[in-house]
Image (cartoon, rainbow, N blue to C red):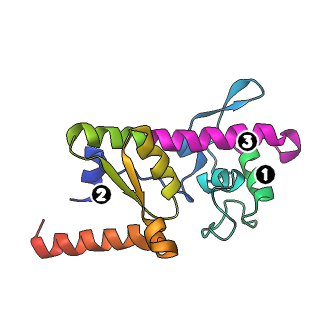
């Protein structure tokens, strides 16, 4: 199986806790009682939404930020404001909470929709093992489709963060060994 084949079958959702551009997650976000379009100019990443909401720490934010400034909550707020072509001074914390929440919720819905397709195809699946930096996304999505979740971090601690990379390496090895 290749990544394009997995994308086609719905087995792969290419989204992550850090680098996914905000505009790849949503087209509109709540703003001042309405719904504003999102600038498709790479001003913020999903990691900024998760950092703003406290789901990720500055230490977790291991990729470059879109504006080159540090991965702090303060600067994440500025980047999120830019998604609606605003400056931080124009938006209060509640507005940024709404923008970050819309991004995070849409990401969970996307993952949940893929899980739903998989469970419909293979109804015997009742458990999702979640791991990695974005395990909280997978955990919430799995709960949405009523899957029992096992958080690898609860069993392996911090080393569970690298489990997705190890799984991909194993898939490659298996594919090479079996020819398929």
Residue lying at the far right in this picture: please name it: 89
Q: How far is mark 2 from mark 1, CA to CA?
A: 34 Å
Which of disc 2 and disc 3 is earlier in sequence?
2
The circle on residue 3 is 2
Image quadrant in which the N terminus is located: bottom left
Q: Look at the numbered disc 2 and give the secondary structure of its residue.
A: helix
Q: Position of residue 102 (x, y in %)?
A: 62, 38
CB atoms at circles 3 and 2 under 8 Å apart?
no
Q: Position of residue 13 (x, y in %)?
A: 39, 49
Tell me the residue at 67%/63% (across/down): 65
Q: How far is mark 3 from mark 1, CA to CA?
A: 12 Å
Which of disc 1 and disc 3 is earlier in sequence?
1
Q: Main secondary structure of the magenta part?
A: helix
Nearer to us in this view, 26 or 137: 137
**Is residue 121 shown left or right of residue 166?**
left
Q: Position of residue 178 (x, y in %)?
A: 10, 71
Determine the image quadrant of residue 55.
Answer: bottom right
Q: Is residue 8 above or below residue 67?
A: above
Q: How far is mark 3 from mark 2, CA to CA?
A: 34 Å
Q: Is residue 115 above or below residue 32?
A: below
The circle on residue 78 is 1
- Bounds of the magenta segment: 82-110
CB atoms at circles 2 and 1 under 8 Å apart?
no
Characterize the local packing of mark 1: few (<14), some (14-19) or many (20 or more) Cα atoms within 10 angstroms: many
**Is residue 176 shown left or right of residue 172?**
left
Characterize the local packing of mark 3: few (<14), some (14-19) or many (20 or more) Cα atoms within 10 angstroms: some
Nearer to us in this view, 103 or 129: 129
Residue lying at the far left in this picture: please name it: 178
Image quadrant in which the C terminus is located: bottom left
Nearer to us in this view, 6 or 144: 144
Q: State the residue position of label 3.
A: 97
Indicate whether residue 107 is drawn in magenta: yes
């Amino acid at each position: 199986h290749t990544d394009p084949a997995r994308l086609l079958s719905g087995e792969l959702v290419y989204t992550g806790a850090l680098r996914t551009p905000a505009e790849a997650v949503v087209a509109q976000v709540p703003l001042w009682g309405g719904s504003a379009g999102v600038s498709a100019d790479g001003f913020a990443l999903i990691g900024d939404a998760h950092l703003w909401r406290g789901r990720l720490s500055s230490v977790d934010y291991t990729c470059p930020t879109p504006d080159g400034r540090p991965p702090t909550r303060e600067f994440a707020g500025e980047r999120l404001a830019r998604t609606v072509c605003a400056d931080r001074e124009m938006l209060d914390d509640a507005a940024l909470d709404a923008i970050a929440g819309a991004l995070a919720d849409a990401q969970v819905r996307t993952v949940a929709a893929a899980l739903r397709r998989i469970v419909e195809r293979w109804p015997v699946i009742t458990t999702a093992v979640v791991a990695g930096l974005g395990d909280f996304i997978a955990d919430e999505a799995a709960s949405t489709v009523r899957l029992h979740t096992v958080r690898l971090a609860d069993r392996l601690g911090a080393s569970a963060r690298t489990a997705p990379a190890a799984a991909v390496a194993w898939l490659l090895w298996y594919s090479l060994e079996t020819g398929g």
